[in-house]
Structures are given as structure tokens and as C-alpha cells.
Amino acid sequence: MLGRIFEREIRRQPDIWRTIAESAKAEQLARAIRERDVVLIGSGSSLFVAQLGALALRRRGIHAVALPATEAPLDHVAYRHAAVIAISQSGRSTDLLDALDLLSPKTLIALTNTPDSPLAVRADLTIDVGAGEELAVPAGKSVTATAAILLWAAALVAGGHGRNAGTLIETSEDVRSWLDGSGVDAVRDAGSAIAAMRSVIVVGTGYGYPVALEMALKLKEASYIHAEGFPAGEFRHGSTAMLDATCAVVGIVDEAARAFVDRPMLEASRAGSLRYVIGGRLDDIPLLGPVTADPFNALAWLVAAQMIALYTGRARGIEPGALAASKAMLRAASPRLWSSRRACYSDSSHLLGRCTASSQLHRRRRSRRSMPAMRLRALPSRHG
């Protein structure tokens, strides 16, 4: 079955969170950053988790910023000699290690899934997120494990009690029950519908924004579909022009975000786009994924995002990460052969692009034929 390893790792996450709940990892991190300005740094999924953690700290009055490791060469002066939380599943990212050379942290804290990595060796404090070996190319369990530690540590720094071992265990059980129940069937059906779309837009605000970015990345990695994450409010400032019947829009909803997410979802309805929400209900839009209490609800959102990406990939006939893995293996095994075969990959990608473009053109023509006359009249005139 396509995505079998990815799904197995998704389903392991509640056990990992329970182990974190029984550990002192969040307390270790909280002690290390108390009364300090903090820079969180990472790339890809690690960057989005860094953004989640930085927001959690800022909400508690701590000066925290998330910096893409790849941007450090041009944006590091203001962050030199700070306390740095470096996030990396492998601990071997050259982008991250090079960025740390530029930042020269006063204190370096490594949040990694590989405690014997180069990152861990140079850190003042290494916290093993404890997700276990990650075999799937779309990283899943290390992402949520890191997020759990960061969210809990932020609460501890401020003396809060809402996030604690008990609430993390409750979230793990809520998500486990959903994964083992019939709610997954709705995600499977949604994945089939999303797979037929041209683009996927994910909108969120607050904690939902970095989760939206992560969901878009997972969709790209697991299904090779075009996907973008947006702040829900900002999406209305120009980007709604891209909406039509060939788009799917997913909103990330909690009570704080509801009013912000509602407006772009209304725009999506007017454009005839496919709509879903995760996290909480919004009008009559189908709800996907587990629902849990606020303290660790972002973990449930991330699992919903992973499952949507998994089933979208299956519907598109994609084995997550297979093309990227084959390229990496060939490059490592024989650089010379890799050089000669790059044109083959390029030709294959071009052919796939042509087929995809043809399919998209057909869908656009079909959607335009069904577009309400009122919407057609609303288009601006070429002659002003």
C-alpha cells in the first residue's frame, strides 16, 4: 500500500507524546531559556515548528524570533550571541550548522531526534525529542514531538499550568481514538477529492499559521500537488484572486481563529472551491481530523494534516518521497552516473508537467463553463 511507512509513523505519535509527558524534557528546555531572548532556527518542517514555538514564547512575554537557517547569511547581525534553539531531526543539516557559525550563540540548545549528531556535539544542551528513527521522507513524528516539547516549555517559562503531563496525555488519547476510529474514512474521501484539484490553499492564524505552512509542505512531499499556506487574514489581500473551482481550501479553526478563517472560507465558497476545516467546526464545512482541548490542539492539527497528505498521495498514486529518495541514492552511489541521468529525470518531470498542465487546462475549461454568469460579469474590463 502506498505510504505504508508514512502511515505507520503517523500512528506512532500518540505513544511518543505520552513518553514526552512522562519525561523532564520540557522542564529542561524551560530552565535553559528562562529570562532570555531566544532565537529559534531551522529549515523546512523544523522552521515551521520553530515559528510555532516562537509564537508560544511571545504570547508569554518572551522575546523570541524564528529564523530560517538559509536566511542567516543575509540576516544574522541582530541575532549574534543570543540564546539559540536549533531544531533539526537529523542534526546534520549543513544549512543549519553553517548558520550557527554565523550566529555564534551565547548558549546553544539542540532539539534533535539524533543525539549523537554534529549539532548535538556542539550544543551546550541537547534535548533528544525521542521520536525514534524516522524512515518516511515526509517527517511526521519528530515534528510533533518537537512541537509538544516547545509548547509545554513555553507554558512552564511563564508559570502556566494549562499545558502539563495530564493535558498532553489527554491529547494523545484523543488522537489515538480518532486514528483507530471511523473518522479517518472522511479523510480518505477528502484525499480523493483533493487529489483531483489544481491547487490546495491552507489558511490559519495564530498557531494555525505555521501549521498551515507545514500542511502545505506535507501535501507537496506526499502527493506532489501544488499547495500553499497563508495567514487567514492576509489571504484576502489579493490572493483570493487565484480561487476557482479547481482549488481546495483548508481552514485551521479554533475559537480564537474562527472569525479570521471564516472570511477566506466564504470567498472560497463564492469561487466554487472545495472546502474543509480541521480543528473545529465552521458552518457546514466538512470537519477533518481529531478534535481535542486547547493546550495541545496544534498536535491534533498536525496529525490531521499528515493524514490528509497521506490519502491525497494515495489517490494520486504517489509513494511519498520515492522520487526524491531515488535521486539521492543515485547521487550518493555514483556522482558521474547521476550527472548523466539528470537529463532523464528532467525529461520525466517535464513530461509529467505537460500531462498535469493538460489536465489542469481541461478542468479550468470545465469550471469556466459552469461558472455563474454573475461572476463572469464581475470580471474587470480590459478597457477600464
Image (cartoon, rainbow, N blue to C red):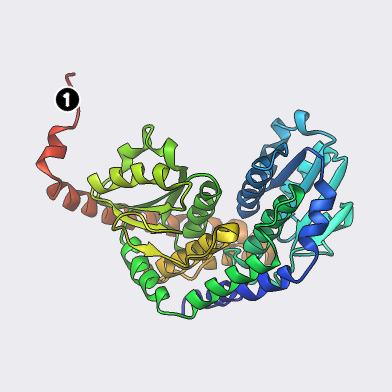
What residue is shown at x 60% (from left), y 70% (from top)? 170
**Amino acid at the residue labelled 1:** Ser
Tell me if residue 2 comes above or below residue 211 in the rendering.
Answer: below
Secondary element under disc 1, as helix, strand or loop, is loop
* Residue 209 position within the rendered picture, expressed as x and y whole percent measured from the top left: 52, 46
Image quarter of the C terminus: top left
- Expressed as whole percent of the image width and height from the top left, the position of residue 211 reads 53, 53
Question: For mark 1, what is the residue?
Answer: 381
Q: Is residue 83 left or right of residue 174?
A: right
Q: Please name the residue shown 17% across and 32% down the image.
A: 378
Residue located 78% across and 48% down the image: 97
Q: Tell me residue 336's x, y (percent).
A: 66, 59
Q: Number of marks in the image?
A: 1
Q: Is 19 or 327 nearer to us in this picture? A: 19
Binning the other alpha carbons within 10 Å of mark 1 as few (below 14), some (14 to 19) or many (20 upward) gives: few
The vertical placement of 33 against 17, above or below, is above
**Looking at the image, which is closer to me, 353 or 68?**
68
Kindly tell me whether residue 232 is visible in this rendering: yes
Residue most extreme to the left = 373
Q: Residue at x 71, y 59 (%)?
A: 149
Residue 377, position as x, y percentages in the image: 12, 33
In this picture, residue 238 sits left or right of residue 63: left
Is residue 93 something that shows in the picture? no
User: In the rendered view, does 267 fall on the left or right side of 317?
Assistant: left
Q: Is residue 113 left or right of residue 353?
A: right
Toward the top, the furthest residue is: 384
